């Protein structure tokens, strides 16, 4: 285990993660535009775009097993190469079945990359700074989500939409080249590994309670992303898109600070306040009648989420052990995939029955359940340690 957090290998992997995330977010806002532009029906365009999330959800349980059993460096090189090929493939043909195949391949490759990068980085983070290290690692995604879509649209407007995809493909290819130069000694398969795949190889039962909590935050994200604009229109509030910019800024600020706090004090001193702040932000949002309240809600929500989610993710890896960091990471992400997907679906039904305020109150109830889940989870761990 490394003694310094900011060692060369850790910094190297942060850079690779930033490149990978940029390649993803640069095309998120323009893929539907491209598909419709080449004559695809809007409904089929939505299906093709949505296949990414469905594929990632299906492949996610197996990415952890693969990361734990095989050379993580080779997996990242392979994943980055396939992501690069997939993105370039979108604009290499107008034949929808081929584009669909590339979309599925993209989902598989991205699911593998996002798990393997965390699993590999975990090997180079000092134990006493583990939460802080996981927090910094995730900053690449936040920066990419804030800047990437705008960069993709700018390239599209100035150099054409095809060049946006090619630029995103180059970002991923650059990540692959960096990994080719990454010094990593693979220890090989450990003796005594059982043949075949068992349920505990793809799902870490030990971290399911943390996965549930992380999934609730993703559910909230899906709800807000899907319905905030419509909610604001109903209230007569303009320019609500600034909400997401504010969220990105405060998520960026909160993640590393929360990691340091957990390392010094303990997980519960971040999770409980974070859940309370999340409830407060949802109450403000549900009753907001001005942009000021919406912005205040964004700040509180982002500080809370930026503190809780990476802390829970780090706790998953710690509980499962570094040797199972891959399956711990994939199990945690599985909760996020499910929550992000169910948020808009369930939210649509709730909004139809109870209005926009109703779905925010449903999220509050789920946050209370998350607090209860965390309480009993920590109690169970304390009892185990005392035995």
Image (tube, grey):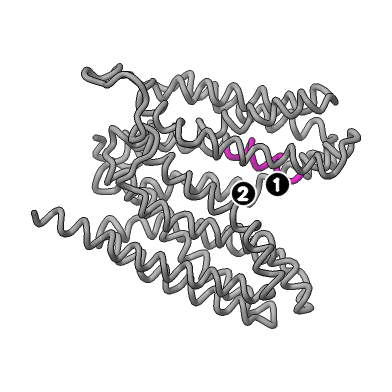
Location of residue 4 with respect to 192 vertically, above or below: below
Q: Which residue is mark 1?
A: 149
Density class for disc 1 (Cα within 10 Å; few <14, some 14-19, many ≥20) is some
Q: Quadrant of the C terminus?
A: bottom left
**Residue depicted at x 58% and y 75%:** 296
Image coords of residue 280 (percent x, y): 49, 77
- Give me the disc on residue 145: 2
Image coords of residue 142 (percent x, y): 55, 50
**Residue depicted at x 42% and y 42%:** 331
Say if mark 2 contacts mark 1, CB within 8 Å.
Answer: yes
Image coords of residue 17 (percent x, y): 51, 37
**Is residue 22 shown in magenta?**
yes
Q: Nearer the viewer, residue 80 or 317?
A: 317
Residue 16 seen: no
Please give the range of residues in magenta: 21-29
Q: Quadrant of residue 125?
A: top left
Residue 80 seen: yes
Using residue 276 as the reference point, say whether residue 103 is left or right of it.
right
- Give me the disc on residue 374: none
**Residue depicted at x 67% and y 28%:** 169
Q: Quadrant of residue 358?
A: bottom right
Q: Main secondary structure of the magenta part?
A: helix
Location of residue 13 with respect to 382 vertically, above or below: above
Location of residue 177 with respect to 310 vertically, above or below: above
Density class for disc 2 (Cα within 10 Å; few <14, some 14-19, many ≥20) is many
Q: Nearer the viewer, residue 7 or 190?
A: 190
Dot 1: what SS? Answer: helix
Q: Quadrant of the N terminus?
A: top left
């Amino acid at each position: 285990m490394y003694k310094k957090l900011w060692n060369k290998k850790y910094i190297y992997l942060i850079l690779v993660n930033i490149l990978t995330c940029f390649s993803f977010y640069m095309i998120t806002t323009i893929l539907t535009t491209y598909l419709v532009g080449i004559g695809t029906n809007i409904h089929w365009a939505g299906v093709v775009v949505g296949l990414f999330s469905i594929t990632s959800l299906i492949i996610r349980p197996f990415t952890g097993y693969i990361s734990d059993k095989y050379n993580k460096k080779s997996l990242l090189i392979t994943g980055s190469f396939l992501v690069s090929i997939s993105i370039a493939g979108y604009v290499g043909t107008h034949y929808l079945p081929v584009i669909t195949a590339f979309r599925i391949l993209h989902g598989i490759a991205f699911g593998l990359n996002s798990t393997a990068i965390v699993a590999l980085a975990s090997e180079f983070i000092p134990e006493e700074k583990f939460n802080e290290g996981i927090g910094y690692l995730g900053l690449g995604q936040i920066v990419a989500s804030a800047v990437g879509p705008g960069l993709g649209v700018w390239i599209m407007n100035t150099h054409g939409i095809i060049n946006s995809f090619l630029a995103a493909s180059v970002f991923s290819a650059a990540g692959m080249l960096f990994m080719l130069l990454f010094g990593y000694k693979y220890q090989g398969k450990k003796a005594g590994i059982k043949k075949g795949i068992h349920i505990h190889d793809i799902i870490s039962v030990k971290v399911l309670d943390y996965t549930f909590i992380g999934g609730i935050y993703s559910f909230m994200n899906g709800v807000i992303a899907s319905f905030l604009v419509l909610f604001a229109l109903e209230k007569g509030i303009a320019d609500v898109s600034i909400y997401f910019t504010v969220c990105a800024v405060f998520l960026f600020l909160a993640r590393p600070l929360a990691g340091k706090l957990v390392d010094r004090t303990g997980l519960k001193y971040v999770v409980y306040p974070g859940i309370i702040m999340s409830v407060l932000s949802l109450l403000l949002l549900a009753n907001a009648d001005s942009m000021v309240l919406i912005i205040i809600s964004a700040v509180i929500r982002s500080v809370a989420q930026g503190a809780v989610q990476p802390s829970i993710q780090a706790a998953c890896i710690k509980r499962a052990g570094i040797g199972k960091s891959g399956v711990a990471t994939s199990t945690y992400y599985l909760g996020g995939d499910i929550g992000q997907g169910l948020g808009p679906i369930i939210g649509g039904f709730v909004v139809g029955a109870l209005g926009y305020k109703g779905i925010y109150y449903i999220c509050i109830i789920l946050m209370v359940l998350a607090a209860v889940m965390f309480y009993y989870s920590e109690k169970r761990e304390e009892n185990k340690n005392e035995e």
